[in-house]
Image (cartoon, rainbow, N blue to C red):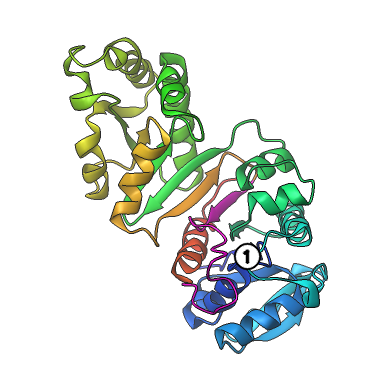
Amino acid sequence: MKRPIIGIPMGDPAGIGPEIVVKALKEAYIHQLCKAVVIGDKATLIQAMKISDVELTIKIVNEVSEGDFREGVLNLIDMQNVAIEQLQYGKVQAMAGQAAFDYIKRAVELAMKGEIDVLATTPINKEALKAANIEYIGHTEILADLTNTADPLTEFEVDNLRVFFLSRHVSLSQACDLVKKERVLDYIERSYKALERLGILNAKLAVAGLNPHSGENGLFGREEVDEILPAIAAAREKGIDVVGPVPADSVFHFGLKGKFDAILSLYHDQGHIATKMVDFERTISLTNNMPFLRTSVDHGTAFDIAGTGKASAVSMIEAIKVAAKYGPNFKR
């Protein structure tokens, strides 16, 4: 199988991003799965290798095609944007916020040109972005703007479980207000198309219930009866294999066991808790319906342990593995 080219923006230099990148790329099997190119800063990565007791040969490339994609080699597009003597681990710094943004921007440019197949991103820090006068609250918003994507679709994946989200960063009361037929139908359709782009055809979807026991036919709330069931019926009329609402206390278990290809969670924590309870470190975030696929670790910059060498690379490794899994079949 052709190895997809995975672009890895290094993340906030003051966080654990550089450490988990070098730890992930020391693993021989990663290089069997994909061709990895890091977009980052050489001095920071050299320091991360010392901290993490990792030995890799850094090959500076100006073009992805110049890469030496073998075990033991870290191919780097060197942005040279960190004054290493000024870098303070675990601290919010404008320099670090600007650098993190620059890595993402360059990686997106390469992906948009088709030189990179998938992005596997590392943590950035919202406060550092703000300190650098970069007015985004996170990766998704940056990617949406840089790719001109109106509403990127978030999916979580862990083991056999795939979860999409009807809403993300809104209050619980707002999330409940967003459970409307039109929105639920739209997200069922978008989730189905997202799975097709990943190479999962004729998918079977489930929609989680909002209320206890999916409302018990209106006994515990009307959302299922008035909004969710009509949306599911409309989706089925369009040929989508979707069922529900399935009570939230069981639907994720069934998804993990393979009964459904994916589940539409109706609010942020409903799906986050379900996936992270399966395996916190191996839960990977995917951003779909952009011109390219993005996978990501599902943790932050971990400023409390940055620079100590203690950071686990499990999530980074999983993000690269998921990117490599879908990269060859992803439909741009």
Answer whether residue 301 is magenta in the image. Answer: yes
Where is residue 297? Give x, y as percent: 51, 58
Q: Which residues are magenta?
A: 292-312
Q: Secondary structure at mark 1?
A: strand
In percent of the image, x 25 and y 48: which residue is there?
A: 258
Please name whichever residue, 246 or 112, is drawn nearer the observer in this view of the structure. Answer: 246
- Work out whether residue 97 or residue 331 is closer to the camera in this orientation and state it: 97
The quadrant in which residue 284 appears is bottom left
| Nearer-the-camera pick, 268 or 2 | 268
Residue 113 visible in the shown view: no
Give the main secondary structure of the magenta stretch.
loop
Residue, disc 1: 5
- Quadrant for the C terminus, please: top right
Label 1 Cα neighbours within 10 Å, binned few <14 / some 14-19 / many ≥20: many
Viewed as shown, does residue 289 lie left or right of 278?
right
Left or right placement of residue 21 versus residue 75 in this view: left
Q: Nearer the viewer, residue 244 or 217?
A: 217
